[in-house]
Image (spheres, helix red, strand yellow):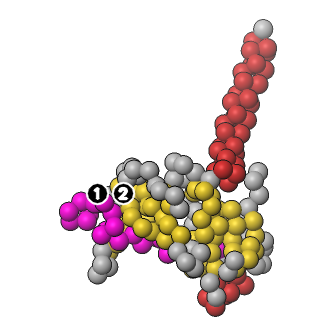
Amino acid sequence: MSGQRLVLAAVVLALVQIGFLSWIIMGRAAVLRNGQEVVLKVEPIDPRDLLRGDYVVLNYEIRNVPVAIVSNAPSDGDAARDTPIFVRLGKDDDGYWRARSASLRAPAGQPTAGEVDIRGIITSGPFGSELAYNVGYGIDRFYVPEGEGRAIETDMRERPFGVLAAIAQDGTAQIKALLDGQTPLYEEPLY
């Protein structure tokens, strides 16, 4: 009888693990499938991970958010590290989306047509003469085929690159494609 319980416990545990992994994958796929698409301008940092292969670390223009555009920033501008921040993006004439305003901990109302809120975390700041927060969005790495990371990094220094990102209603972002100008170099599969 105890052998049957052990088998039953193993089956239940396996089903729970499969369910959890499926939930993570489906959540990511839902953002990629249904999220608002934006193009963010990027600059390279480093192209290699010994365990996972070549990648490009992406430094976004929207990484530095001026304290002046944060509607509910403390009067001294000092916000704690790891504080959630919602940055409202709008599309410029060059096709890239840039920060219009921001709010700590929760979005400042509903975005209007042509705007979207991206959720980030304050990683440092305020810094610089104009006081800005350094913000991470969880989309700072894009893995590329082995041996191509350095070439892409070199190309990024010579011409503009971007990322096509999908942003869910809650502000969660996922990378859909790495762009060389307007041309997709690599697209992220849905599953």
Secondary structure under the numbered disc 2 in the rendered image: strand
**Could you tell me residue 5's position as x and y percent?**
74, 15
**Residue at the (73%, 35%) spot, across then down:** 18
The residues colored magenta run: 54-79
Magenta-span inclusion, residue 23: no
16 vs 108: above or below? above
As displayed, is residue 94 above or below residue 29? below
**Figure check: 155 above or below 99:** below
Asked whether, in this view, residue 169 is left or right of residue 105, the answer is right
- Please say if 77 is above or below 26: below
Q: Closest to the observer: 144 or 87?
A: 87
- Image position of 71 (left or right of 51): left
Residue type beneath disc 2: Ser
> Label 1 is placed on what type of residue?
Asn
Judging by the rendered image, the residue that carries numbered circle 1 is: 72
User: Which residue position holds label 2?
Assistant: 103
Residue 159's tag is: none
Q: Are marks 1 and 2 in contact (CB under 8 Å)?
A: yes
Q: Nearer the viewer, residue 180 or 8?
A: 180
How many callouts does the rendering have?
2
